[in-house]
Amino acid sequence: MNIVDASLVGLHWNARRGTAGYHHGADLNNDDRVNILDAALVGLNWNRVASSGGV
Ligand SMILES: [Ca+2]
């Protein structure tokens, strides 16, 4: 997680899967929405590599 991940979450904030604003890279917990839970994951995993392999 780094500034790129944080930027993706910000750019795609509140987007849902299937909409134009959605980006898989911003949906860190894969719940089909980009929201506070994804932002929290960025904070928790700052400077760590995502176990899922990332984007
Ligand atoms: Ca999410």
Image (cartoon, rainbow, N blue to C red):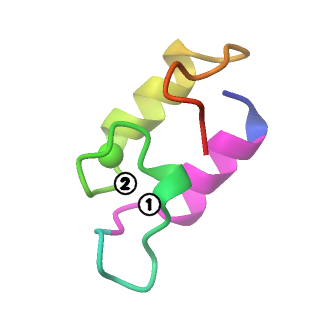
Between the residue at mark 2 and the residue at mark 1, the CA separation in whole angstroms equals 5 Å
Is residue 44 a member of the stretch shown in magenta? no
The residue under label 1 is 13
- Mark 1 beta carbon near ligand 1 (under 8 Å): no
> Which residue occupies the foreground of this view, 34 or 23?
23
Say few, some or many: other residues with alpha carbon within 10 Å of mark 1 (under 14 / 14 to 19 / 20 or more).
Answer: many
Is residue 7 a member of the stretch shown in magenta? yes
Q: List the single residue furthest toward the front.
A: 53
Q: Are marks 2 and 1 in contact (CB under 8 Å)?
A: yes
Question: In the rendered image of this protein, does residue 27 appear above or below residue 46?
Answer: below
Where in the figure is residue 7, as x and y percent of width and height? 68, 51
Question: In the rendered image of this protein, does residue 15 appear above or below residue 49?
Answer: below
Picture quadrant where residue 47 is located: top right
The total of numbered circles placed on residues is 2
Q: Secondary structure at mark 1?
A: loop
Q: Secondary structure at mark 2?
A: loop
Name the residue rendered at 55%, 52% in the picture: 25
Picture quadrant where residue 19 is located: bottom left
Which span is picked out in magenta? 4-15
Q: Is residue 10 left or right of residue 30?
A: right
Picture quadrant where residue 18 is located: bottom left
The residue under label 2 is 34
- Mark 2 beta carbon near ligand 1 (under 8 Å): yes
Mark number displayed over residue 45: none
